[in-house]
Image (tube, helix red, strand yellow):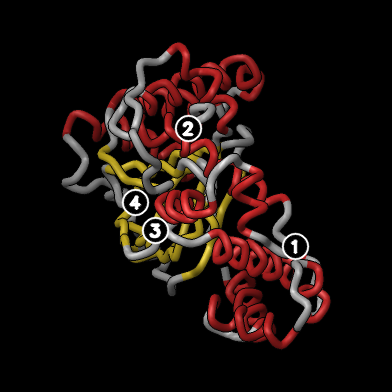
Amino acid sequence: MQHKPLYESIPPHLQECCEELTARIERYAPGEGTHDTPWGSLTVFRADSTSTPTCTLYEPSFGIALRGAKQIVLGQEALVFEPGRYLLTSVDVPVLAQVSRAAPDEPCLCLKIRFDLPRVRELLPEVRAARASAPSRGIALSPVTGDLLDPVLRLVRLLETPEDLPVLGPLLERELLYRLLTGEQGARLAQIATAGSQGHQITRAIQWLREHYQRPLRIDDLAAQVNMSTSSLHHHFRAVTAVSPLQYQKQLRLQEARRLLLSERCDVATAAHRVGYESPSQFSREYSRHFGAPPLRDVVRLRVEASVA
């Protein structure tokens, strides 16, 4: 059966490239869920049906939607991730995401390439990227261009010759980063990686929170850690992530607790303690508000969904 992966939003001159990319990526997504590929930073997501909104954390990455659509909500901003657009995530951001368009014969299909900011930082001196005056949201959508599709497609082709990946893969990732930095979202990416900038300070604050989320958080201490005033930290942190540092820490704790409950089969009290909660009842209340169900009920639902998929 021949699929119809493309929509009018993809310019005609890019459709052949997208068709090939879709056909090649499908081989690495035989079923629903997220799938690894021979290139460690490249993963593929597939969903055969729509889903309910789910709280999750998006990491620094570049993504392309090839079929279907996702709705991604950050703060009060809703983004529709669909064919013809790429998603740039410059920092770890908490979002509400759902598959909004998918069917068994027309699944939602996306690819994602993770990147680390040190590699972006290494490239900055060689690139004439625009610089933003103040930190902006850590996630954005833009139209896909041929300059971006070309290195992505060549990287996906390389998956079939794994012996070439160690040499050519890094070169293609570097080319992709160059295209991102010189493209529409270049300023958004550069501000996070530029040493000494407010965006870079927020990146350091996010990194500290990710490494120490179990600890009690004093905002004054975090501000001093990244050389910012408390008010400036609050303002710019919210500008990038749409939440306060305390809310961000809470979401990190709850995401990790969910992982512990699912993967390590911890009981609720143990999971709560390991992520920094002193009160299991407070943990259960906040978990229910965040994920829409108490811990045990949520975990049972996720396991049933995984077994069906």
Q: Earlier in the sequence, mark 3 or mark 1?
A: 3
> Relative to residue 154, is residue 93 depicted above or below?
below
In depth, the one of 74 and 225 nearer the eye is 225
The residue beneath circle 4 is 67
Q: Earlier in the sequence, mark 4 or mark 2?
A: 4
Q: Are marks 1 and 2 in contact (CB under 8 Å)?
A: no
Disc 4, SS: strand
Q: Earlier in the sequence, mark 2 or mark 3?
A: 3
The residue beneath circle 3 is 107
Kind of residue sitting beneath label 2:
Ser
Q: CA distance from mark 1 to mark 2?
A: 27 Å
Q: CA distance from mark 3 to mark 4?
A: 6 Å
As drawn, the label of residue 197 is 2
Q: Earlier in the sequence, mark 3 or mark 4?
A: 4
- Residue 267 % position (x, y): 81, 80
Q: CA distance from mark 3 to mark 1?
A: 38 Å
